[in-house]
Image (spheres, rainbow, N blue to C red):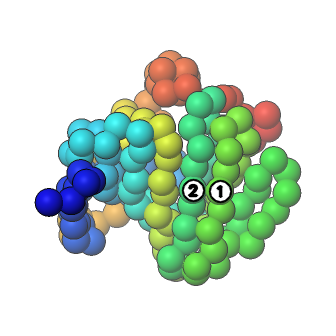
Amino acid sequence: MSDYAKGIVIALGPEDGESFWQPLPSTGYVINKINPYNSPYDAFSTGLQVLEPGGHIRRHAHERSHELLFCYCGSGQADIDGKLYDVLPETMILIGRGVQHKVTNTGTGQMRLLWFIAPAGLEDWFRAIGRPRRPGESLPAPFDRPADVAMIQAQQRFIPPDKD
């Protein structure tokens, strides 16, 4: 008998998880992978975000959360507090709470990112602004964010952008 408690294992395939098409300007989708809704871990959540060419994650900051981004496919640029970083496969960026950031797919193909955020909550944002996605569906026509996006941002403790 060991003196430590074992945790659980969660193994998810490429399309496993709750998935949502994202509104403009992201023009892609998100798959919420591990979060407090499907695991015993309340302190973090993680998932995948796919940005189509020209799409971007709007400038924002998180009031209470620290975010880790890892690019595993595609290329782009991250604007973090006004400093530009090239984002290529195997680029990892840690973004502390309160730090304004924007990520743009500048490549010709999809940009694929793994996101990890602590504490958890980003999964709720994607659910609130997105539209349900099923594996294999074609990219929908671009659509706008919900009319109440400012309220959703406030509920999710986003810090408004300092510029667009």
Kind of element beneath mark 2: strand
Indicate left or right for 27 with 65 as reference.
left
Toward the viewer: 52 or 113?
Answer: 113
Residue 124: x and y in percent read 37, 35
- Quarter of the image with the C terminus in it: top right
Residue lying furthest left in this view?
1
Could you tell me if residue 111 is visible in this image? no
Q: Residues within 10 Å of mark 2 (few under 14, many from 20)?
A: some
Task: Decide: is 4 above or below 150.
Answer: below
Residue 155: x and y in percent read 48, 21
Residue depicted at 61% across the width and 35% down the height: 62
Q: Are marks 1 and 2 in contact (CB under 8 Å)?
A: yes
Residue depicted at 23% across the width and 46% down the height: 39
Residue 38, picture quadrant:
top left
Task: Decide: is 91 above or below 78.
Answer: below
Amino acid type at circle 2 is Leu
Task: Decide: is 149 above or below 127.
Answer: above
Amino acid type at circle 1 is Leu
Question: Which mark, residue 94?
Answer: 1
Residue depicted at 34% across the width and 63% down the height: 139
Task: Decide: is 123 above or below 16.
Answer: above
Question: Which mark, residue 163?
Answer: none
Residue 14: x and y in percent read 27, 71
Indicate left or right for 21 with 114 as reference.
left
Toward the viewer: 90 or 22?
Answer: 90
Question: Which comes before the other along the chain, label 1 or label 2?
Answer: 2
On the image, numbered disc 2 is attached to which residue? 68
Indicate left or right for 88 with 21 as reference.
right
Between the residue at mark 1 and the residue at mark 2, the CA separation in whole angstroms equals: 4 Å
Residue 154: x and y in percent read 54, 21
Residue depicted at 63% across the width and 29% down the height: 63
